[in-house]
Image: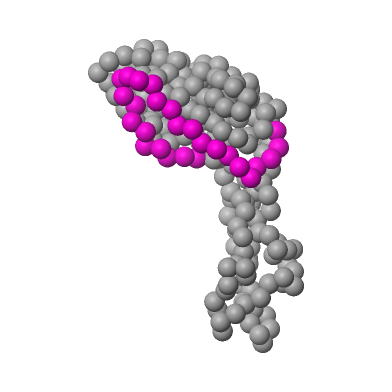
Amino acid sequence: PLLTPADRPRPRPLPRAAQVFWRVTALNPCGAGTASGVYDLTVSNALCWQPSLAIPDDPDVSDTRSIVGLSGSITDLDLVLRATHTWVGDMIFRLVHVDTATTVTLIDRPGSCGNNDFDVLLNDEGTYGTVESACNASPPAVSGNRTPNNPLSAFDTQSIGGSWRLECSDQAGQDVGSLQEWCLQATGVVDSLLFADDYEFGSTGRWSAVGF
């Protein structure tokens, strides 16, 4: 069947870090069909962006993203960083919550390491040691679940909403790279309902289909 724009579900974010179940039931003027089997998926609690932002020797660069539709105060915040660079010891990364001006330097020229690339979870409870001590011989040089140079707990009690900026600073010449992806993983965040118009409660009173 064809649905008018008013009939279509208006999607909302799925609840994060949760297992979600659904099934499908067909409706037409003759009534409802048999419900499908139950399916499920587990939703990540990560908000991710893939800017593919070039990191030159100079000037510094940054990627700013706005988060809307989420509520609740952060109780724990982690950051996933994926970036290419041919001398990771050149790099400084800072996370800024623009709305509060809170700034945390996460990585600060780790160990003057001359090896390549970042693929790391920055986590105050990291189990692989400090990011400063990371220097794998094979890429990525900085990897694992590591504690940042300064704690992300500086953002605790703040709202996840608003603008966030990841700043990238190359402190030496010759070697360059690219910011491939960064993700915020926040605990304590609540999403809106998946659908509007009572769909999630099984009520079809506000739904109709046309074009059979």
Residue 102 sits above or below residue 39 on the image: above
Residue 173 appears in which quarter of the rendering? top left
- Asked if residue 144 can be seen in this view, the reply is no
Question: Residue at the location (71% across, 37% down)?
Answer: 72
Residue 187 appears in which quarter of the rendering? top right
Image colouring: one colour
- Asked if residue 201 can be seen in this view, the reply is yes
Question: Residue at the location (63% across, 21% down)?
Answer: 154
Range drawn in magenta: 48-73
List x then y, in percent, for residue 186: 61, 35
Question: Residue at the location (58% across, 55% down)?
Answer: 41
Q: Along the line of sight, which residue is nearer the eye, 26 or 147?
A: 26
Q: In which quadrant is the C terminus drawn?
A: bottom right
Q: Along the line of sight, which residue is nearer the eye, 163 or 120?
A: 163
Residue 131 sits above or below residue 40 on the image: above
Residue 178 sits above or below residue 87 on the image: below
List x then y, in percent, for residue 93: 45, 22
Please count the marks in the image.
Answer: 0
Q: In which quadrant is the N terminus drawn?
A: bottom right
Question: Residue at the location (62% across, 77% down)?
Answer: 209
List x then y, in percent, for residue 117: 35, 27
Query: Of all residues shown, which one is farthest toward the left?
Result: 174
Q: Judge whether residue 180 is colored magenta.
A: no
In the image, 34: left or right of 61?
right
Q: Judge whether residue 65 is colored magenta.
A: yes
Query: Of all residues shown, which one is farthest toward the bottom?
Result: 30
List x then y, in percent, for residue 161: 63, 36
